[in-house]
Image (cartoon, helix red, strand yellow):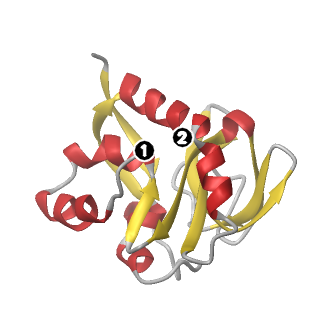
Amino acid sequence: MNIKNYLIALALTSPFFTHSLSLAEESDPADTLFDGEYNDAKMDQAMKEARENLAKFKASLSRKSATNHAVKVAIKDGENVEHFWLIDLRPIEGGFIGTLNNDPGLVSNVKIGDEVKAIGEDISDWLYFENRKMHGNYTLRVLLPNMSPEEQAQYGPMLAPLP
């Protein structure tokens, strides 16, 4: 197994997200990045599964019981790649347009509030809430074992089973 240190945007798993989905106020990149170890192969598999199950996410968009929809997108800037959650989504051919929900920590070609497209392989995850459970968020599930016990206790119980 290849374990490395990476920085992964976790904007929607910060405390403000558990109440409602809105732009992070005065977002601090240090608060939105995960600086820890995880298994590359498991993360790649999680992103692949999220894309394979995107139809479940799209179907949830029309259900009134499903709320707080978000899509995670990879943003490239030179050699740097950072993953961000987009909110206020609008479906487009092959993906979504949404609003960037946090300030970058690695890339400098986007900022909070920018409108960004998420298409095809650039989509790395998705989530929504229904029946008080978080659906999707495949990448969080890979990171969860390496989070603090407090974070595990906060996020673990809110995750719905995967399809």
- The residue located at (70%, 58%) in the rendering is 110
Label 1 amino acid?
A: Thr
Q: Classify residue 139 by image quadrant.
A: top left
Q: Provide residue 62's location: percent of width, then percent of height.
A: 70, 68
**10 Å crowding of disc 1: few (<14), some (14-19), many (20+):** many
Q: Provide residue 106's location: percent of width, then percent of height.
A: 54, 48
Disc ID at residue 139: 1
The answer to whether mark 1 and mark 2 are in CB contact below 8 A is: yes
Can residue 98 be seen here? The reply is: yes
* SS state under label 1: helix
- The residue located at (73%, 64%) in the rendering is 98
Disc ID at residue 50: 2
- The residue located at (45%, 35%) in the rendering is 46
The quadrant in which the C terminus is found is top left
Which callout, 1 or 2, points to the residue nearer the camera? 2
The quadrant in which the N terminus is found is top left
Q: Residue furthest right?
A: 93
